[in-house]
Amino acid sequence: AQKVTQAQTEISVVEKEDVTLDCVYETRDTTYYLFWYKQPPSGELVFLIRRNSFDEQNEISGRYSWNFQKSTSSFNFTITASQVVDSAVYFCALSEAPNTGNQFYFGTGTSLTVIP
Amino acid sequence: DGGITQSPKYLFRKEGQNVTLSCEQNLNHDAMYWYRQDPGQGLRLIYYSQIVNDFQKGDIAEGYSVSREKKESFPLTVTSAQKNPTAFYLCASSIEAALGYTFGSGTRLTVV
């Protein structure tokens, strides 16, 4: 079973629109960590955010915000007033604890295209 | 600046050849990882190493080999046994997976 599901394969929005990328995870652990990474066309994965399972506070960083809901096992990512530079593939990931050292569970990614 | 360096950025291989992808980090991270990414797909774990002179197979280790002789280095060899080697390869490292990974910029391997 997929531990991290990103159901949206591709999304296109027009610049300045808001867009939400969905992430649903599955774990039996009470302690775990959730992440979002951005992969621009250059290829390198860039860390965006880390959340532990005990902190359900939503977070805002500039135009980015994250909504963590344990009740629905979701960790969604919203970009407000999207820009062309936001075009990238975005990955959600899960790390369980205690960690065996080998595992991040990545979703399959959502490719976001922002149209000028 | 601390980070992960992958080289080369682009690599072309003839069928039947082995090639080695380099991954070097100066972050003093114990753990290092190799992932493969195919177009439109997520990341699949090839090998990982938590400590020098030790490494473990990931989900798709067949046709690949690694070594970890130094903390800073974790080279990946794509052998001729790998039937579909054309892909984007990403190296990563971490102090602890719960803190997140740092990724290199990747190597795009093409079989010609």
Image: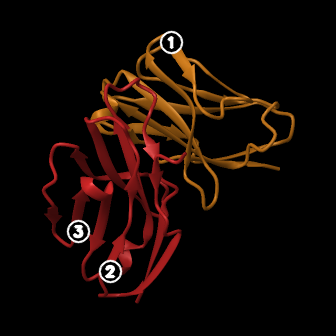
Picture colour for chain A: red
Q: Which mark is residue A111?
A: none
- The chain identifier of the residue carrying mark 3 reads A
Residue B101 visible in this rendered orientation of the protein: no
* A13 sits to left or right of A61: right
The one nearer the camera, B22 or A82, is A82
Q: What crowding class fits label 2: few (fewer than 14 Cα within 10 Å), some (14-19), or many (20 or more)?
A: some
User: Residue at the location (36% across, 26% down)?
Assistant: A99
Q: How many marks?
A: 3
Instruction: Say what amino acid the circle numbered 2 marks.
Output: Gln
Q: A65 above or below B3?
A: below
Residue with the most extreme right position: B16
Image coords of residue A73 (percent x, y): 33, 54
User: Residue at the location (39% across, 57% down)?
Assistant: A24
Picture colour for chain B: orange
Instruction: Say what amino acid the circle numbered 3 marks.
Output: Tyr
Q: A48 above or below A27?
A: below
Do the residues marked 2 and 1 share a common chain?
no
Residue B76 visible in this rendered orientation of the protein: yes
CA gap between label 2 and label 1 equals 44 Å
* B56 sits to left or right of A17: right
Quick one: quadrant of the N terminus of chain B?
A: top left
For mark 2, give the secondary structure. Answer: loop
CA gap between label 3 and label 2 equals 12 Å
Residue linked to disc 1: B54
Cβ atoms under marks 1 and 3 closer than 8 Å: no
Q: Which mark is residue A83?
A: 2
The one nearer the camera, B20 or A54, is A54
User: Residue at the location (78% across, 44% down)?
Assistant: B84
Q: A102 above or below A89?
A: above
Residue linked to disc 3: A64
